[in-house]
Amino acid sequence: MSQQLQDGFGRRFHYLRLSITDVCNFRCSYCLPDGYRPEGKSKFLSFDELQRVMTAFASLGTEKIRITGGEPTMRRDFLDIVKAAAATPGIKTVATTTNGYRLSQNAQQWRDAGLTQINISVDSLDPRQFYQITGENKLDSIIQGIDAALAAGFERIKLNAVLLKDLNHDQLPHFINWIKRRPIDIRFIELMETGLGKSYFEKHHISGDVLKQQLLELGWTLDPREKTAGPADNYSHPEYQGRIGLIMPYSDDFCATCNRLRVSAKGQLHLCLFTEHGIDLRDLLQDDLQQPQLIQRLENALQTKKATHDLHSGVTGVRQHLASIGG
């Protein structure tokens, strides 16, 4: 048995993004502008099935698991899933990405359960603009949740902001000022085209290079990348406690450092966020005795992973919206 998941290009995969639900209670304009609409009766992976996924990946060198959605905290067993991930041998980091609507009441409990990193989607620090983008008037409570997470001992909280031309692309000074005395990373994510979003993409896409140049002119410098880090290029400044990250999937070398794989809430392995199809794992998640076959399928699948996505050619994959695969 291999001790590392490695593809045909020598890339090793230490990071699993594990979706546990497609459901989300926000209506973000770039993802679910009409709100979540279920397609028939959803049958998301059960707790036992999720455990088997985590065990298999950990046995192949995965060190970090990010629990995603939809909005992952909408699952009633979210806390149990965090505990199971933290208890999986070989897993060193348990993270989640959330819209933060339950954060203020649960930050300490999640931290105690073994959650080590938390990313919170905050597309604007202006309440009116936040509502315009997300469809929810909850910025104040989310800021309270961020304060609760800091108090609970999360050392490096990350905020995700989708970079949107004519909506929030000019908010960099506001975000920079906000993190001067807060140990928080703000990560601006370039808008990515999905199946339902071509016109929205054409209207609101702007390159992260615009912010990169602003940061360099202001004296921010690029940090070294860690082995299990996500796709962001992080910039630091000696006068600021926080950092600024840029995620630019349209940059020429974006896929060169790929280190993460995705499993959807319905049990499909996705080798790329913009893959045309998933590889079904669920038939091998029904019994612990199927672990050898599951591991073999994962290893075989990695040999079919392409060198890069095809976003530059307008190929966005089958994803109609990012909530269906966990981003």
Image: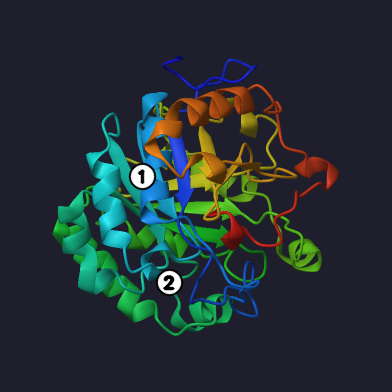
Label 2: which secondary element: loop
Residue 51 shows which numbered tag? 1
Q: Is residue 105 left or right of residue 38?
A: left
Of the residues shown, which amino acid type is indicated by label 2? Leu
Of the residues shown, which amino acid type is indicated by label 1? Gln
Applied colour scheme = rainbow
Determine the residue positioned at 75% across, 62% down. Answer: 201
Q: Residue furthest right?
A: 313
Instruction: Name the residue nearer the viewer: 137 or 275.
Output: 275
Q: Which residue is mark 2?
A: 125
Determine the residue positioned at 50% across, 31% down. Answer: 294
Q: Is residue 116 visible?
A: no
The Cα–Cα distance between marks 1 and 2, rounded to whole angstroms, is: 37 Å
Q: Is residue 97 left or right of residue 194?
A: left
Instruction: Name the residue nearer the viewer: 225 or 262.
Output: 262
Image coordinates of residue 133 in percent, x first then y, are: 57, 75
Q: Are marks 1 and 2 in contact (CB under 8 Å)?
A: no
When the figure is inspected, residue 87 is found, relative to residue 129, above or below; the finding is above
When the figure is inspected, residue 159 is found, relative to residue 64, above or below; the finding is below
Residue 30 shows which numbered tag? none
Instruction: Name the residue nearer the viewer: 55 or 261.
Output: 55
The crowd level at tag 2 (other Cα within 10 Å; few <14, some 14-19, many 20+) is some
Q: Is residue 51 visible?
A: yes
Image coordinates of residue 180 in percent, x first then y, are: 30, 55
Quadrant of the rendered structure where residue 258 is? Answer: top right
Label 1: which secondary element: helix
Determine the residue positioned at 39% across, 40% down. Answer: 52
The crowd level at tag 1 (other Cα within 10 Å; few <14, some 14-19, many 20+) is some
Image coordinates of residue 167 in percent, x first then y, are: 62, 71
Q: Earlier in the sequence, mark 1 or mark 2?
A: 1
